[in-house]
Image (cartoon, grey):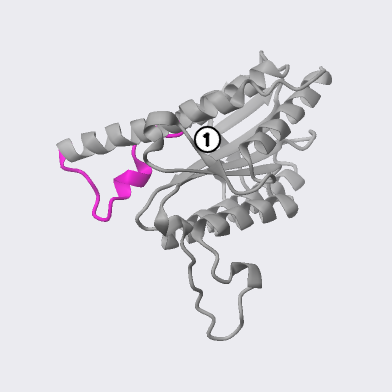
């Protein structure tokens, strides 16, 4: 049976529009309350900006055979055991008949500061995956097949995210592909390598300017890190799990 990708392109555009719309509403509320953080941190952390993408992911899961699975979105039930730490909080957990089918992280970043945020996001993503798979190897989930582990990132498309970035290399040179790479290119390399190293089943990078609040238009940097690849991998994993019932 063919995979159902749930008209993901239309849903993704709606999710991008919702991202910027929810973000603007949250910032306005913070401004009214006088709580806008210095440096605009509220711009990054405010609101449920990624809810549209959550809706798309839920649709994919239900359309590909796991209509009765427990799709957890409530913070109080989104933790999984770790190995280097007791627990890790995820954004979506899919559990079917006591087995973990999927765990997904949804992240975003907007300007003007990209440097420190890129490093923090990278370290968090790599550490989360390493911690999870070590815990899985050590039996934290019991005896079960490998789940789908996904990482989806949305980054603001603007000159600072697309401009070449220099590197400090006082002792040893960086890998050549990082020389002059923009933050978007760095994120793309991060996603590709996390999948190649089997840290994640799929990792997606999409980018959209603030003007996408009107039309939901977004861009991708490579087929490997595209939303379609992410959605197809998730749909295939879900369909395979459903076929075992």
Magenta stretch: includes residue 35 = yes
Residue 244 point in image, percent of width and height:
84, 21
**245, 203: nearer the viewer:** 203
Left-right relation of 97 to 180:
right
Judge whether residue 243 can be spotted in this image. yes
The N terminus: image quadrant: top right
Q: Residue at x 56, y 59 (%)?
A: 186
Give the overall secondary structure of the magenta segment.
loop
Instruction: Label 1: state its secondary structure.
Output: loop
Left-right relation of 169 to 160:
right
Residue 3 point in image, percent of width and height:
75, 22
Q: Residue at x 23, y 54 (%)?
A: 38
What is the quadrant of residue 27 in the picture? top left
Magenta region, residue range: 33-50
The C terminus: image quadrant: top right
Magenta stretch: includes residue 136 = no
**219, 112: nearer the viewer:** 219
**Residue under pointer 1:** 91
Q: Residue at x 49, y 73 (%)?
A: 166
Q: Is residue 47 above or below residue 10?
A: below
């Amino acid at each position: 049976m063919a995979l159902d990708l749930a008209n993901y392109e239309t849903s993704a555009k709606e999710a991008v529009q919702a991202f910027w719309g929810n973000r603007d509403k949250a910032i306005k509320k913070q401004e009214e309350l006088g709580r806008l953080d210095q440096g605009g941190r509220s711009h990054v952390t405010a609101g449920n900006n990624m809810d549209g993408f959550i809706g798309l992911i839920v649709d994919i899961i239900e359309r590909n055979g796991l209509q009765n699975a427990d799709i957890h979105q409530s913070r109080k039930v989104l933790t999984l055991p770790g190995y280097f730490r007791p627990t890790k909080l995820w954004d979506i957990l899919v559990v079917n008949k006591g087995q973990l089918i999927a765990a997904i992280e949804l992240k975003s970043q907007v300007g003007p500061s990209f440097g420190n945020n890129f490093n923090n996001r990278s370290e968090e993503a790599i550490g989360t995956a390493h911690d999870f798979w070590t815990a899985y190897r050590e039996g934290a989930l019991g005896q079960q097949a490998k789940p789908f582990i996904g990482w989806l990132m949305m980054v603001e498309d603007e000159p600072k995210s697309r401009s070449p970035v220099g590197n400090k290399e006082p002792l040893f040179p960086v890998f050549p592909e990082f020389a002059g790479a923009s933050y978007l290119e760095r994120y793309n390399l991060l996603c590709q390598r996390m999948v190649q190293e089997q840290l994640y089943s799929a990792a997606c990078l999409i980018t959209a300017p603030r003007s996408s609040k009107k039309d939901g238009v977004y861009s991708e940097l490579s087929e490997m890190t595209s939303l379609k690849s992410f959605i197809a991998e998730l749909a295939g994993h879900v369909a395979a799990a459903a076929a075992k019932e």
